[in-house]
Image: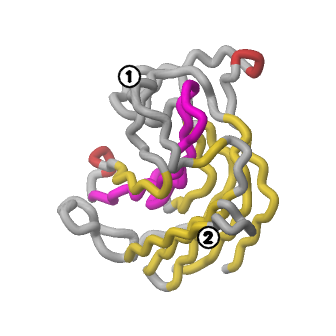
Amino acid sequence: MGGKLSATLAVDWVSTSGDDTKFPAHSVVIGQIHGLGKTEPLKLFYRKLPNHKHGSLFWNYEIRPADQSQRYDIPNDVWGSHQLTSESKDPIDGIELGELISYVIDVKGTIMTLTFTRALGTDKEETRVFTHDLGKGLAGHPLDRGYADDALHLKAGAYNQCNMSTENPIWGPGCSNDGLDAGDYAQVSFYRLDLQQ
């Protein structure tokens, strides 16, 4: 297990429709680790509510139970908060659309290190680092077996999370999908992307 994905990017837009109490609404995944089958140990999210100036950057770790129907995500905030709604105050510690950010996903053995940097090249540059052992189950989550025996690969892109479904209590934000003119899309500009294995 191992690999390193480095990216410098800006999120230009996120979908404007959907149930804002469900975090897939108004969000886009900008990087992830995918495993075999449906497993996704890591997803990096940017989310911004339509009435906020700033958005949130956070990452989700997905527990890996023996029964895949019991999978669920554990969110970890970097800047802003994953659980904001339109009634929340603007997360002024968050990231604006168009703001340049970078991330590094570095996996050595089973140790995953995530490094996030904002305000690149300025006197306000700020970096936050998180570490997790993918080979072990997450403490406090007894169903999690970890990913030591899974084949993993790194992905970067713009994966719009806003879908029209309303059935799932978490993943069904009920976006209207009214098209580009209505703001129902996601757009991310990558300025640097480097993959080492």
Left or right: where 5 falls relative to 55: right
Q: Is residue 30 visible?
A: yes
Residue plotted at (38% across, 22% down): 167
Looking at the picture, tell me which residue is in the foreground, 19 or 122.
Answer: 122
Q: Pick whichever, 170 or 102, lies toward us.
A: 102
Q: Earlier in the sequence, mark 2 or mark 1?
A: 2
Q: Residue furthest bottom?
A: 109
Q: Tell me how the rendering is colored.
A: secondary structure
Residue 20: within the magenta?
no
Q: Amino acid at mark 2?
A: Val
Q: Mark 2 packing: few (<14 Cα in 10 Å), some, or many (20+)?
A: many
Q: Are marks 2 and 1 in contact (CB under 8 Å)?
A: no
Magenta stretch in the rendered image: 37-65
Quadrant location of the C terminus in the rendered image: bottom right
Separation of marks 2 and 1 at Cα, in angstroms: 34 Å
**Camera-side mark, 2 or 1:** 2
- Front residue of this view, candidates 78 and 186: 78
Could you tell me which residue is drawn at 50 percent across and 75 percent down?
A: 113
Q: Residue furthest front?
A: 123
In this rendering, the answer to whether 40 lies above or below 148 is: above
Q: What residue is shown with label 2?
A: 104
Where's residue 30, x and y in %? 63, 51
- Which numbered dot is residue 167? 1
